Image: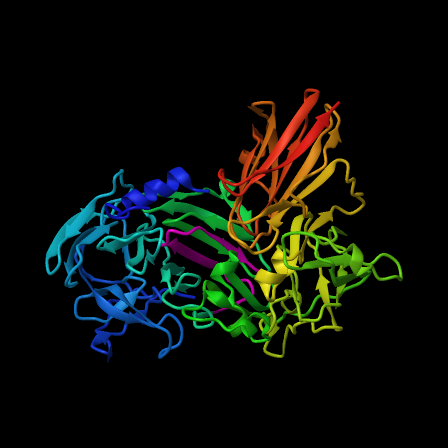
Amino acid sequence: MGALTGFADGVRAFRRGALVLLLLTPLACNKSRMVDGLPVASANDNRVRAGEMRGDTLALSLVVQMARWYPEADPGPHVDAPVFAEEGNAPQIPAPLIRVTTGTIVAATVRNALLDSTLRVVGLSSRPAGEPLDTLIIPPGETRSVTFEVGAHGTYMYAAQAGTVDWDIREREQLAGAFVVDSVGAPADDRVFVMNVWGEPRDSINYDNAVAINGRAWPHTERLFASMGDSIRWRWVNATVRPHPMHLHGFYYQVTARGDMARDTIYSHGTQRTVVTESMKPFSTLSLAFEPDRPGNWLFHCHIGFHVLGTARLGPSDHADHASSDVGRHMAGLVLGLTVNPAPEWREPPRAGTRAVRLLVHEGARRSHALRNLSFMLQQGTTEPSPQTARAPGSLLVLTRDEPTDITVVNRLREPTAVHWHGIELESYSDGVVGFSGDSSRLAPMIAPGDSFTARLSLPRSGTFIYHTHLNDLEQLTSGLYGPIVVLEPGAMHDPERDRVFVAAWDGDEEPPKLVINGDSALPQADLRRGTSYRLRFVNIGPAASIRALLTRGADTVSWRALAKDGFDVPVHSAHAQRAVLVLDVGETADFEFTPDQVGTYSLHFAHAPRLRPVVQKFRVR
């Protein structure tokens, strides 16, 4: 992307080409310490609002200046970059929180303290806003003022760009913060989280990232605490040029609002989606709510591997980190940890009539672009499956709602692994995050070579889910350690002829990715019957990149009916016939009903991006 006229051009470009308590008190004087002549930027937890209320007007004085940012440990790896601050106070990443009620007038000044860069500021304007967004152009050493009424309630952002940035080479998204407008009288007991990124090439191979939530990268992000039954409400701002599919372990959450820099859409109760993963486009906002009903440690994180693995750290990464039992080493970047404390009356629920399943982790002979051939293999009977039959994806696990199921994972590899039961509502200890899942009395171990671990699943709902490695993710995941889960209603039988599962993944860790569907890039033709309804289940478990699926007959796109997202039935307004087009981000699943009404050949196209070769599933309908 070329130089932006503010951030407005970037927002429009991505639209066209998109492949617990809040303390609202005035900001106290917060002087920053100096290092090498630069003030140190503080991590802004978005609990304190910026500016000073004078009647119905918020007086706000901002400055952009050079500062030193420690996204991880302080002292530690750092970035020297332009940063927002309130005049007289320490610079902050993300930028100071603007939070007011509807009807408020904002009288803001922005001073450009940079010596050699013109500043372009967007987002200091009324909402909803038109396009192009209003932009303040501030030469070095100068100040500009703006006065406006905030407009509609919602979650927004404001941001700046210093000088010209070649977005194809580097990123400079540390100059951004949240702009929240509350309805008069509405509770302000939610939390606000902003994702910022600074990045540039370290050399011809490596890229340095500072990826942060409220100014810090895991394991230095804020640890959150709640109790069972608490009403948790979060506002998220993606202040970056990257998409982020945000995944919650162990629970579903309701998407209560979605927006961008210009406007926010508040969903009524009947139109809210219930998900475990929701993709945030660049420069977008997300409001969510959930009530945890099980104690333990849980993660909320971006599901793009490059944003949460050890390589997401600023500076060089030790390869040994990837297989470490320390969650502060094998994960990094855009990760939050939530500890849910048990209610006083809580007792671990009894388990009766438990089904036992045995799952082997094997390595077979290399058979594709991936350097290795790893597989989860379901044991049938008393004989273990042979590693010679290993292939991706792992075995389809067909389970039953409300049937307690213990899955014993036996590791036959020469290295440790772990399994996350993605989208499943389960006990924390079984969730599969090594060194984190569980509680203060016990934490989930890695599954050492030759050892095993038994995950206890309760399965309170039917749907389409995923299981996948959660250790040394990039290598193990792109080598095949993933698989689909289908949970059926009690008494239902799985019919593979009418119930089709399509798992999208990468064949190896090269970029651009080599897309495979059900472990292959060339799929055999399948037969369907005219007038028969089929359930098509889609899973995207690559380490990055959304997929696009398109079902056609000849040159025409056909129709299907949406059934579920992430294993949860879609709202009534979405469960209707629609064009058979799907964009599925990493960590998402989606189910559709397709009833072919004509004989002939249908084609289901899968692609990561238009420029990459698609994988096509042909259907012959008789």
* Image quarter hosting the C terminus: top right
Q: Work out whether residue 69 can be spotted.
A: yes
Specify whether 59 is left or right of 578. left
Question: In the current view of this chain or complex, which residue is farthest to the left?
Answer: 142
Rendered residue at 51%/56% (across/down): 304
Location of residue 476 in the rendering, given as x and y in whole percent from the top left corner: 63, 61
- Total labels: the figure holds 0
> Relative to residue 23, is residue 513 depicted above or below?
above
Quarter-of-image position of residue 343: bottom right
The stretch drawn in magenta includes residue 163? no
Quarter-of-image position of residue 111: bottom left
Location of residue 251 in the rendering, given as x and y in whole percent from the top left corner: 58, 57
* The residue stretch that appears in magenta: 224-249
Location of residue 515 in the rendering, given as x and y in whole percent from the top left corner: 59, 46
Rendered residue at 52%/46% (across/down): 546
The stretch drawn in magenta includes residue 238? yes
Q: 379 or 186, which lies in front?
A: 379
